[in-house]
Image (cartoon, rainbow, N blue to C red):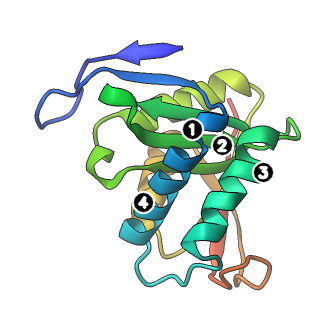
């Protein structure tokens, strides 16, 4: 468990944020972060699943089968989610922050945690249109390894695979 109240970025002081492994009660909050973040960051990308399907996926698959971490702010509010592949490959399946929590160091904390969990290296996919994500991952030492036309993802959106090796 990692608790921090420091605010390395501009803006009002942050409430204490705890990063911890997710449990079944966190599924809805994690799904809500995913929904809000996706819609804010990718308004032009068609979602492949309805809100209820996303919530069910977090409840039935993500939380029980993946290494899932949440960032919890005051009053138990889930403000971020990190999902690592359940197969031990060092793949970041998902990293989403509530829109109001972007740019406040929480994504940095999640990536540091992922690097600690998989010190031999990580990989991840993001959409080509998501240039803020590209800048974020590149700032953390990830390099582009592959581009696709999107024909293999559910959204049919061109994507890019990033890798990080120590």
Residue at which label 2 appears? 83
Residue 25's spot in the image, x, y percent?
60, 36
Labels 4 and 1: the sequence-earlier one: 1
Residue drawn where x is 44% and y is 44% of the image:
139
Image height of 128 relative to 98, above or below? below
Labels 3 and 1: the sequence-earlier one: 1
Label 4, label 1: how far apart the Cα atoms are:
16 Å
Residue at which label 3 appears? 61
Q: What number of labels is visible?
A: 4
Label 4, label 2: how far apart the Cα atoms are:
14 Å
Quarter of the image holding residue 154?
bottom right
Residue positioned most to the left:
12
Image height of 17 relative to 108, above or below? above
Labels 2 and 3: the sequence-earlier one: 3
From the viewer's perspective, is the residue at label 4 or at label 1 nearer? 1
Quadrant assignment for the N terminus: top right
| Marks 4 & 1, CB-CB < 8 Å contact | no
Quadrant assignment for the C terminus: top right
Which numbered tag is attached to residue 1? none
Q: Residues within 10 Å of mark 1 (few under 14, many from 20)?
A: many
Q: Is residue 52 left or right of residue 63?
A: left
Labels 3 and 4: the sequence-earlier one: 4
Q: Residues within 10 Å of mark 4 (few under 14, many from 20)?
A: many
Label 3, label 4: how far apart the Cα atoms are:
19 Å
From the viewer's perspective, is the residue at label 2 or at label 1 nearer? 1
Residue at which label 4 appears? 37
Label 2, label 3: how far apart the Cα atoms are:
11 Å
Residue drawn where x is 70% and y is 82% of the image:
150
Residue drawn where x is 77% and y is 85% of the image:
151
Residue 88's spot in the image, x, y percent?
86, 35
């Amino acid at each position: 468990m990692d608790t921090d109240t420091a605010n390395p970025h501009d803006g009002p002081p942050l409430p204490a944020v705890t990063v911890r492994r997710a449990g079944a009660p966190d599924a809805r909050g994690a799904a809500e972060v995913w929904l809000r973040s996706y819609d804010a960051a990718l308004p032009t990308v068609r979602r492949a699943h309805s809100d209820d399907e996303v919530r069910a996926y977090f409840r039935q698959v993500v939380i029980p089968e993946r290494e899932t971490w949440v960032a919890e702010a005051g009053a138990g509010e889930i403000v971020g989610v990190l999902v690592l592949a359940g197969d031990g490959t060092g793949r970041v399946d998902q990293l989403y922050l509530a829109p109001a929590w972007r740019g406040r160091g929480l994504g940095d904390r999640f990536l540091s945690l992922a690097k600690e969990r998989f010190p031999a290296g990580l990989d991840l996919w993001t959409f080509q249109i998501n240039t803020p994500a590209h800048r974020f991952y590149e700032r953390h030492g990830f390099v582009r390894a592959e581009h696709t036309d999107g024909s293999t993802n559910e959204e049919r959106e061109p994507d890019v695979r990033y890798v990080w090796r120590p």
